[in-house]
Amino acid sequence: MPRTVYSPHPRKRRLPDWVKAPLPKGEKFFRLKSLIHKHSLNTVCESASCPNIGECWSAGTLTVMILGDTCSRACRFCDVPTGNLQLPRREEPGEVADMLSKLNLGYAVITSVDRDDLPDGGASHWAETLRLVKKKCPGMKVEALIPDFKGETECIEKVCRAAPDVLAHNLETVPSLQGKVRPQCRYQWSLNTLNFARREFGLVTKSSLMLGLGEKKAEVIKTMRDLVNIGCDILALGQYLRPSLRHLEVVEYLHPEVFAEYKEIGESLGLSHVEAGPLVRSSYHAEKQVPLPK
């Protein structure tokens, strides 16, 4: 299949039709928004300017973001603020559990900013949040989309012992672009995080890649092989969209045909599920990728 792309002209900012998302609307959307703001909680949907916020919130699904709304790292693709870090709120784990218990969800995703300023990177806060959520929402599956904790296994272990149903961590891009895209991260830290969760705890593991940053097809396939080799189960592939002029430019917009091809390749390599498409993000349709409780 030919590599069909749309390369943005430097003076034109018109997006191809396949990366345009509908505007938020509907009763469920505004109910979710009200609950989130009432409990002073953060979501990656808002903080990272996710294009799927309308679709997901209207369907009653969301990704809660813990450990505050400010990150200790400054990845060049991400719209989450950095700097001016505050101590995590002790009440947050209980508030997250309370809010999720009111939504009657079958599946929820919890993520966080990176907190390299904390002694354990926020792992204890993570574990407490997961324990309380599972206690208050016994019929709900929980996906933990965690930082790399600089590859420190003691921190990763704290989260794994809280028994999320899925342990996710995003590679974000291919090895050759790691230093450009997320300079404070390491490709091997990410692989080690997923490998440890799978090898030591037998957890279902998941990762995500953004495409359109200048990666080559062979690099994407090699990265998928790396994930298969460490036992990763699920992969999400989506188009990188530039949040602002301060962020990395888009090198190319990949056509849906290209995403379909990558899905086929990834699953043929041994990934149990590849969610691929221009607007796919790591938590997009997450509830459909893992069997829900009966």
Image (cartoon, rainbow, N blue to C red):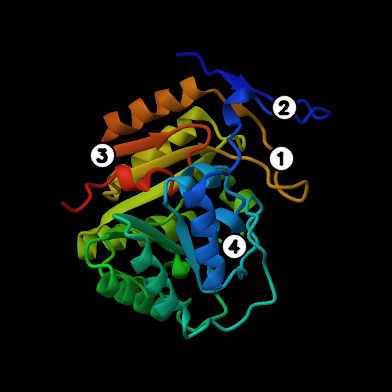
* Residue 249's disc number: 1
Q: Earlier in the sequence, mark 3 or mark 1?
A: 1
Left or right placement of residue 197 versus residue 184 in this view: left
**Residue type marked 4:** Gln
Is 210 rendered above or below residue 257?
Answer: below
Q: Residue at x 62, y 24 (%)?
A: 17
**Residue type marked 2:** Pro
Would you identify the image quadrant in which residue 123 lies?
Answer: bottom left
The residue where tag 3 is placed is 272
The residue where tag 4 is placed is 184
Q: Which is closer to the viewer, label 4 or label 1?
A: 1
Is 69 rendered above or below residue 31?
Answer: below
Residue 206: x and y, percent?
35, 50
| Structural crowding at the residue carrying mark 4, measured as other residues with C-alpha within 10 Å and reported as few (<14), some (14–19) or many (≥20) | few
- Distance (Cα) linking label 2 and label 3: 33 Å
Residue 31: x and y, percent?
50, 57
Q: Residue at x 54, y 47 (%)?
A: 53
